[in-house]
Image: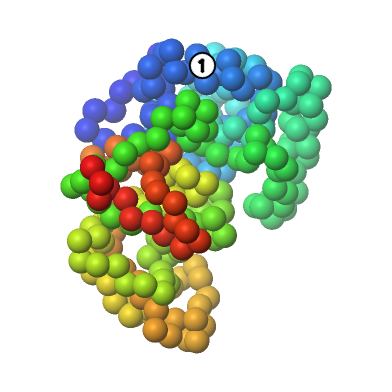
Amino acid sequence: MFEWFDGEFMTDLDRFLALPKVERDYFFSSLGYYAYTLCEIDDNQRRIPFYVGKGKGARCLSHIDDAKNVEKYDRVEQLQATRRLGIDIIAHGLDEKTAFIVESVCIDLLNVENLTNAVRGRGENTKRMPINELASLVNDKPVIIESQHRGVAFLLEKSFKSDFGDLELLEITRGVWAHKQSDDIKYAYATFRGVIKEVFEIFSWVPAGTQQYFTRTISEEAMASRHEFVGKKASEAVRNLYVGKVINKKRSFALPYVKVGFDV
């Protein structure tokens, strides 16, 4: 049913499907009724919804199995073949009536211009996230950062948005920070609600504003005496270990970051 792409970076759907069957079954049994969206992942890693549904159990995966000669299923088949299909859970832990309501509201929203961030769900079970990330939270299996990948986890609770692409995520992770990290900090972990959204390899630290920002507007005053790192996405091998998983970290004590991988 599903192909395995050996040697390539795994998509969030790849990671979910790679979980042991017992973990996938436990995940779906824990959700109750839920609402979900099928997404097209564009070249900048934006997740663009094109179908909203509701269901129970593994209903959200049925669109991959039951390809038919209609527009939606043709699109699913094409996106799955090109590894650009994503499944996001919109709300879970619902009864069937509520799931219908959520589904209907989301369908209405998809017909509205400027849909992005129009509505944020209430409650912990109405936060949109990729299916593999929610499975990581539900299964409660935090990943421990290995010593050779030690670094700093940046806690992007106030700045991250679910529609961020690669550039937005890099720019809110690399700066601007009040403290310059030490030279033994080789990796930056962009995290949101405890989940690792991306991993960056750090080359060096420079004064804030050294690099141009394309998706953020930061005043000179805000950059004064602050720092940013120069870097790029980590290797696919490193990203496959950590992206989409709950991170095992110490308390940050109100700091916007915490060091990881130093106690292994």
| Residue drawn 65% across the image and 38% down it | 124
- Please indicate, yes or no, whether residue 46 appears anywhere in the rendered image: no
Left or right placement of residue 147 versus residue 256 in this view = left
- Mark 1, secondary structure of its residue: helix
User: Residue 212: x percent and y percent?
Assistant: 39, 76
Q: Is residue 199 depicted above or below 94 in this figure?
A: below
| Residue drawn 43% across the image and 13% down it | 22
Left or right placement of residue 215 versus residue 108 in this view = left
- What residue is pinned by disc 1? 26
Q: Is residue 187 depicted above or below 90 in this figure?
A: below
User: Residue 261: x percent and y percent?
Assistant: 27, 48
Quadrant of res 98 = top right
Q: Residues within 10 Å of mark 1 (few under 14, many from 20)?
A: some
User: Residue 148: x percent and y percent?
Assistant: 18, 47
User: Residue 258: x percent and y percent?
Assistant: 38, 56
Quadrant of res 111 = top right
**Amino acid type assigned to the residue bearing label 1 in the image:** Tyr
- Foreground residue, 24 or 52? 24
Left or right placement of residue 244 versus residue 106 in this view = left
- Please indicate, yes or no, whether residue 157 appears anywhere in the rendered image: yes
